Image: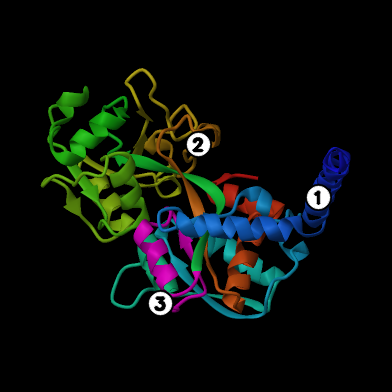
Amino acid sequence: MAKKNDTPILIAAFLITAALISFGGWWLTRQFGDNLGGIVSDGDSSSSTTSSSPASSTVADIPSSQNFASVASVPSGVFSYGGSTTWAPVRGMIDPVIQQAHPGFQLRYTDPVGGAPSSGAGIQMLLNNQIGFSQSSRSLSPQEIQAAQQRNFTLREIPVALEGIAIAVHPDLSVEGLTIAQLRDIYTGQIDNWSQVGGPNLAIAPYSRPTDGGTVEFFISNVMGGGNFGGTVRIVSTTTEALRAVASNTGSIYFASAPEVIGQCTTKPLPIGNSSSTLIAPYQVPLVPASQCPAQRNQMNMAALQTGEYPLTRRLLVVVKENGQIDQQAGEAYATLLLSQEGQSLLEQAGFVPIR
């Protein structure tokens, strides 16, 4: 009889205990939810390591400012940086304006020792503690992410603009455009005459910079499918040298950052597409003929790059070393400056596509 009377009491006690536990869990979540979530996230990420995926920021992660002067938390000091040659217009046109707005934020571009500047060289210099942040025209590789982890820090990518790869040929070459597949076949050597792609009976002379640059790595990945160049490809050290070669040889072809190609008077950019029926010009049509240059110059087809309609489009990235030091603050401030309204406007003037 006593056992029967105890049953309601035990049930009530169980319900009260469950309610207290539930309330306690709710209260802890309200008080420490963010921290608890971070602990869980860290545990999960350690089991799936970031060795294949770089830490990255979206545009929404970066505060929006109207102009350079209104950007806060810009550190003072001399900060070395380096990296991609694609960023040359930024270094020449925009960085001096940044330093006028923040005189204490002194930027010093640094070339790699014993090698040519490139995205890869800049990231390696960042890993070796030779520079404070890097400018890149490609994403971090798994090997670079792992190398940073072995040095007890992480590398973070911050996108600041979009940019296209343009294909340069001689102004007199009569070719409507190229598909990605035709471009690949030219650089593997399977297509070696312009007559094979609707052009004149003329041998093709493809040019490229060395394969350690971000632009070439992007081309190899997105056009070549990771394959190697054929034996007909001629390697030159700089884009200036390559464009001079294209200007002097009617059968030549070269690929480079679109701002380096579109406005040239001595070469012509080609429309590119995934099929012959979807060729997209990287310039604003109609094409300005060489005879009218430099009084008129071709302008970037910003809309096609922004929508991704033009197939050879990529991001420009500021690569920051997350180590809690002032160099991290400098890299983050640099990205914030470029993502301000003034920075995005200047990037567009330099031939890049704003993303904010």
What amino acid type should be assigned to the residue bearing mark 1? Trp
According to the image, label 1 marks what residue? Answer: 26
Few, some or many residues within 10 Å of mark 3 (<14, 14–19, 20+): few
Few, some or many residues within 10 Å of mark 1 (<14, 14–19, 20+): few
Q: Is residue 236 magenta?
A: no
Part of the protein shown in magenta: 129-153
Relative to 255, say whether 236 is above or below.
below
Q: Residue at x 38, y 37 (%)?
A: 291
- Distance CA(mark 3)–CA(mark 1): 46 Å
- Distance CA(mark 3)–CA(mark 2): 34 Å
Image coordinates of residue 70 in percent, x first then y, are: 78, 63
Instruction: Decide which of tag 1 and tag 2 comes sooner along the chain.
Output: 1
Q: Residues at badges 3 and 1 in contact (C-beta under 8 Å)? A: no
Q: Residue at x 81, y 45 (%)?
A: 14
What amino acid type should be assigned to the residue bearing mark 3? Asn
Q: Residue 197: which quarter of the image?
A: top left
Label 3's element?
loop
Q: Which quarter of the rendering shows the C terminus? A: top right
Residue 305's disc is 2
Q: Front-most of 10 and 105?
A: 10
Relative to 319, say whether 351 is above or below.
above
According to the image, label 3 marks what residue? Answer: 128
Q: Residue at x 47, y 76 (%)?
A: 131
User: Which one is in front in this view, the residue at disc 3 or the one at disc 1?
Assistant: 1
Label 2's element?
helix
The single residue placed furthest to the front in the displayed view is: 1
Label 1's element?
helix
Image coordinates of residue 235 in percent, x first then y, are: 20, 55
Instruction: Decide which of tag 3 and tag 1 comes sooner along the chain.
Output: 1
Q: Residues at badges 3 and 2 in contact (C-beta under 8 Å)? A: no
Instruction: Decide which of tag 3 and tag 2 comes sooner along the chain.
Output: 3
Q: Residue 75: which quarter of the image?
A: bottom right
